[in-house]
Amino acid sequence: MLSARMLLCAALLTATTRAQPAVHRIIFDTDFALPPEDDGLALAFALNSPELDIVGITTVAGNYNVQRANADVLRLLEIANRTDLRVYGGASRPLVHQADAYAKTHYGKWWSTDPAPPPAGGFAKITVQAEPAADFIARSVLSAPGQIEILAIGPLTNIATALQRQPAAARAIKRVTIMGGAIAALPDGAGNMTPNAEFNFWVDPEAARLVLRSGIPIVLSPLNVSRKTSFDKRAFDAVVASKTPVARMIETQMGPRFARDSSFHPHMYDEVAAASVVDPTLVKTQPMIVDVDDHHGIDYGASIGGNEPWPGAEGAARIEVQYDIDNDRFMRLFVDRVARLPQRR
Ligand SMILES: [Ca+2]
């Protein structure tokens, strides 16, 4: 029979456990570039969020090529004194998508073969791991089934490649939170690369379709919710005032832009996806069937979401789609976290 003292101890232990934030073991999959790119701000946020245990960072071509993603992310880890984290170089090209004249004259340098320019402060001394990103993803999730999530904030090439090489990985991944897509059936659902296609999905439509159809539990953070947010001068000033090494880098990278135009207020994309893992109550989601058009026609890369199955979407999966955000609370959390001094774990 349990004594009163033992029951009290058990109650205290339960209360202590409840007070701790839930820790998410995540792989941070990114078409990285330093701020003003959103991946840079999202990683600055993630590094200072005790709810996130980053088990590895994987890079992919998207905003720029993978050489630049590697150089910039390694540099941010040095600035943030987080060289304990490992970076795995990923896909330099989408699964199928070939760069054409449209790709080369519109946003994105995923197709470029240029060497990476030196990031702010010069190239980092640390380097990427020898293991390719897709192999790291598959190995990690298969060695800890049901425990590891992926925060996917670039084209989904690495995850799709991991699933092609190791199909069993789909059942081992706990969840993927994706910044990608735009849902026309919800408000603010236009594309930003073509009239209907969002950039990450458009760069690698075949990968996006494969991952969305994989059966992995997925939360989608589409353009619809990004368009309700912005990183304005007030938020910038609050981050800069902390004078941490990361804040000084953000000031160097973004200060001239805000100095030219104090009304500059870029939307927040990857930052929303990251914050929604830390605090899911920041966003509202609804279940929808979402699929991606991989026909090389006028809607290549467009995501389509519906409440019920429709012809052509056979095999598409029902996922959680973010459609609204408490922007004031999100911004408070974002600024608070980015302005902290990074801590090694
Ligand atoms: Ca990104």
Image: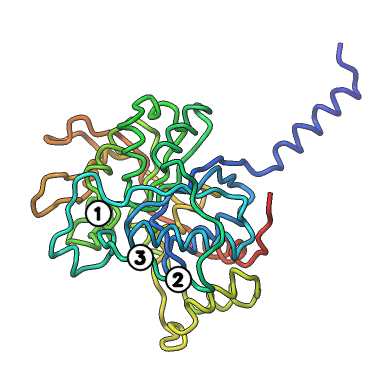
Q: Amino acid at mark 3?
A: Pro
Q: Is residue 121 above or below residue 326?
A: below
Q: Earlier in the sequence, mark 3 or mark 1?
A: 3
Left or right of residue 57, residue 210 in this image? left
Spatial separation of the CA atoms under disc 2 and disc 3: 9 Å
Q: Which residue is mark 2?
A: 118
Q: Is residue 142 above or below residue 250?
A: above
Q: Quadrant of the N terminus?
A: top right
Label disc, if present, on residue 115 of the rendered structure: 3
Looking at the rendered structure, the secondary structure element under dot 3 is loop
Q: Which residue is mark 1?
A: 203
Mark 1 or 2: in front is: 2
Looking at the rendered structure, the secondary structure element under dot 2 is loop
Q: Amino acid at mark 1?
A: Val
Mark 3 or 1: in front is: 3
Left or right of residue 96, residue 335 in this image? right
Q: Amino acid at mark 2?
A: Pro
Colouring mode (rainbow / by chain / secondary structure / one colour): rainbow
What residue sits 63% from the left and 77% below the top?
241
Looking at the rendered structure, the secondary structure element under dot 1 is helix
**Residue 161 drawn at (x, y percent):** 32, 38
